[in-house]
Image (cartoon, grey):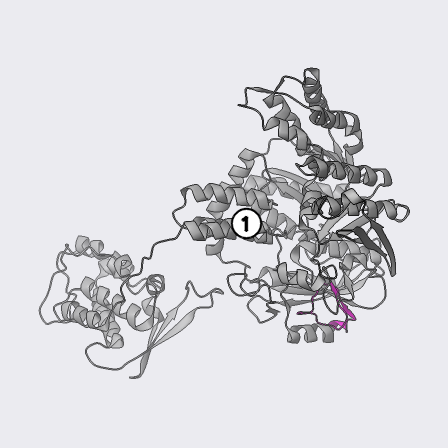
Amino acid sequence: MVMRQLTKSWRARGYRLVHYIDDFFFACRSSAEFARVQACVLADLAAAGLVVSKEKCQLKCSHVVKFLGFVIDTLFGQFRLTALQKSKLNSAIELCLRNPQSVPAKTVARVTGLITSLSLLTGPISGLFLRFLHRALATRSSWYSKVQLDSAALGELRFWRSQLSRFESRDIWRKHSVLCVLYYDAGGQGWGGHLDIGSEQHKAHGSWEPHEVHGVASSTWRELTGLLRLLRAFRPLLSDCTVVARGDALNVFSILSKGGSAKEHLQSVCLELFSLCSEQRIELRPEWLPREENARADYLSKVRDVDDFGLSAEAFAFISARFGPCTVDRFASEHNAKLPRFDTFYWCPGAAAANTFTQDWGADERKYCFPPPNLVAPTLRHARACRARMTLVVLGWRSAPWWPLLCGSVESGRGFAPFVRQQLYFPAGREVLVPGRASRDRFSGKGVPISDVFALDVDFRDHVAGLPSADSELAQLSVDLHDAALLCRAAGTFKTYAGPWKHYKEWCQEKGVPALPSGPLTVALYMMRLLRTAKSPSPLLTFSGAVYLNHSLAGLLSPTNHPLVQMARETARRIKVAGLNQKRPFLASQIRRLFDLWGNFSANLHQLMKLTAITLCYTSFLRNDDLVAISWQSIRFVAQSHMELFIPDSKTDQYHKGETIYIARFGGPFCPVTLVQRLLDVTARLRTDSRLRAELAAAHRPLLYAIDLFDILIHYTPRVQVTASPRDRPIRPTCTARLGTVR
C-alpha cells in the first residue's frame, strides 16, 4: 500500500514510470528533467522511511537500463535479453541435451521457467515450444528424480538453442497502427474467409480432401488448418503486417492465445502457423466471434462488456455545445451510441466498423471517444499517429498508468499536456454516468464507477513536437479542482480488500506468477485454494472483488469475468452454503418493558443511556456506528413538533455529506424526544462538576460518551446525583455494559 501511494503521487505529477513490487523504472524527456525527478523520488522515499539500496540502483541518466531481467533500450526502442539470461538458458539446455535419457527434473524445470520468463519478448511462442517439455516434466516421481526426454521434447530444446537469437529483442513501440482484419471459418466440406484492408475486401475459399472432411478430422483441427491455409492464400498481402484473426471457434482462440496444444496433431498445425508467420513477419492476434455472420450480434449477447457505461444524454449535449459537434462515436455499441455513426470493438447491428483502431482517424471531423480505462493509452497513441481531433472523456483515475500521458511536463508539475485545448470537469456524485445493459449490476450495484469525469478537447493536428497549451492557467485550475475532488472509492472498500489482495500477491510471488495483471487461470486456482478452508462463499467473493478493484484502478481488464473464475465462484456458492443466522426482531412490547425497567425516576445514568440508545436505534433505524457519532451539540429541538439529529458520517453516506434525521414528538411515556431531553438534563448537571467538565463537555463529544466514562465517574466521586428524582442515588459499579452491546 505504501508503494502504491508513492506511485499514485508520482504519476499524478506526470512522472512516467513502471512499478513492480519494490522496483521502479522512470522515463524522462531530458537530463534536466531526470535530475528533478530523481531528486523528488529520493526525497519521497526518504520521507516514507524507505532505504534505497544504491548498489542495486542505476541512478545515472542513461538510454539503456537493466530492469526485471531485461535491457530497456529507449534509444533504439527495444526490450532486449540480458547476456546473463542467455547464458543461463543455454547452459541449462546443454545440460539437458548431454544425457537426454536421464535428465534431473529440476534441470528441465529450470529450462521451462527461464523460457516462460521471456514471454515479454516471445509472446505466446514461449508456450508453443514448451508443450512436450512440460509433458516430460509431468512424468517425474519427485523433484529429485530424473526424467526421459523424447524426440519432441529434444526438438523443442534444439529450437530454443538455435532460434534464441531471434527472440532476444522486441520493439517497445508498435510500428504500425492500422491493422489488417482476417475473418475465417471452417465447415465440414471446406474452409473460407475474407481479408479486410481499408475499404477493400479479399475473399478466399478451399475444399477439404476426403480424409479431412467432417467425421474424419476433428473440428478443431479443421478450424486451425483453415486459418493456416487462409494465411497462405493471402501471403502476398500480409507480409510485415499485424493481422487480427477473427473466428467462431473458441477452442482455436484459446490454443492460439496460450501458445499451442497438448494434442500432437493440433500442436503440429500450430507449429506450421508459427513458421509461416515467422517467414512473412506477420504478427497474429486471435479474436473470437460467434458463429452467425461471424456472429456479431450473438457474440455481444454472450460476452459481458463491463465497460459499456457511458455519459448521460444531458452531459453529452453540454460537452458538444462547449467543444463542438462530433461526427462519429469511436467506442460504442448499438445500446449506448451517442451518434448515428459509431464504431464497436465487435460487430453489432448499425456499426460503421469493428475495432476502431483499424480505422483512420485523420480527417478534420471531430471524433467522440469514451474508451474503456484499459484502452486510454492505445486511444492516445492511435490519435497521435492519425493526427486526429477528438473529444476525449476519461475517468479521474490519477493513479492509473495512463494518467501521465495526459499530464503536462514535469517542469510545470501540473496541468494537462499541450494537445489538450480545453477541459471540463464533472465531480463525482453527479448524475453524469449512466449504466449500460451489461454493467447494471457492477460497481456495487450502481452500474457505474464512483469517479469524477474529465472531458478533454484533444487536437493532434498541429501537435507534432509539442506546442504551448491554449491556457495554462485554466489547465492548472482544472487540476486544482481535481485534487479537491472526492476519492473514487471509500476508505472502507480499500480496507476490506487490502488483506485478501496482500495474501494473493504473496502467493503469486511464491509461485512465480504475476499478480497484476492476473491471468484467469491463476485467479481460478487461487480460488480453489481458498475453497479448501472456506466455510462460506464469502472469502472467495471478497477475493474476487479485490482482484476486480485492483485491476480496475490499474486500468486493466479484470479476469473476474472469465468463465473459469465465474465457475469457481458458482462452485463456492453451491458447496459452501452458509447457514442462516437470522436474529429475532426487536418488538415494541420489549421496548415498553425496558421503559418499565430503566425509565423510572430511580434509574441511574448508565441505565438511562442504554434505554436512550435502544430507543433511538429502534425508532430511527440507526446503526450502532451512527449512534456513537452523534454529539450533543448536533441535537436540535424544534418547538413541540420534532427533534433533529445530525449524523456526520455513516456507512450509507458514500460522499460524507452528513445526514439529518427527523424524529417526531408524539408525547406519552415512550416518546424518544422526551427521553433524549431527560438524558441531556441529567448530563448537564454533571458538567457543573469541574473535575468532569473537560471530559463531558468537550466540543463534539458523542452524546453517549458517558457510557464509556462510567469507570471515570466512579473514580472521581463515589456518589454523584444523576437522577431526576428528589432522592440522591449512587451509580452502581456493577453496571459495566458498553454501548457496543446495544445491537
Query: Which range of residues does the magenta coloring cover?
Result: 323-344
Residue at x 42% of width, y 49% of height: 575
- Extreme bottom residue here? 640
Residue 349 seen in render: yes
Q: Position of residue 452 (x, y in %)?
A: 60, 64
Q: Which residue is mark 1?
A: 565
Q: Is residue 39 above or below residue 705?
A: above
Q: Nearer the viewer, residue 420 or 192?
A: 192
Q: Nearer the viewer, residue 552 or 394?
A: 552
Q: Position of residue 398 (x, y in %)?
A: 62, 55
Label 1 amino acid?
Answer: Val
> In screen coordinates, is 272 left or right of 606?
right
Q: Quadrant of residue 416?
A: bottom right
Q: Nearer the viewer, residue 509 or 356?
A: 356
Q: Quadrant of residue 58?
A: top right
Residue 36 seen in render: no
Magenta-colored segment: predominant secondary structure = loop
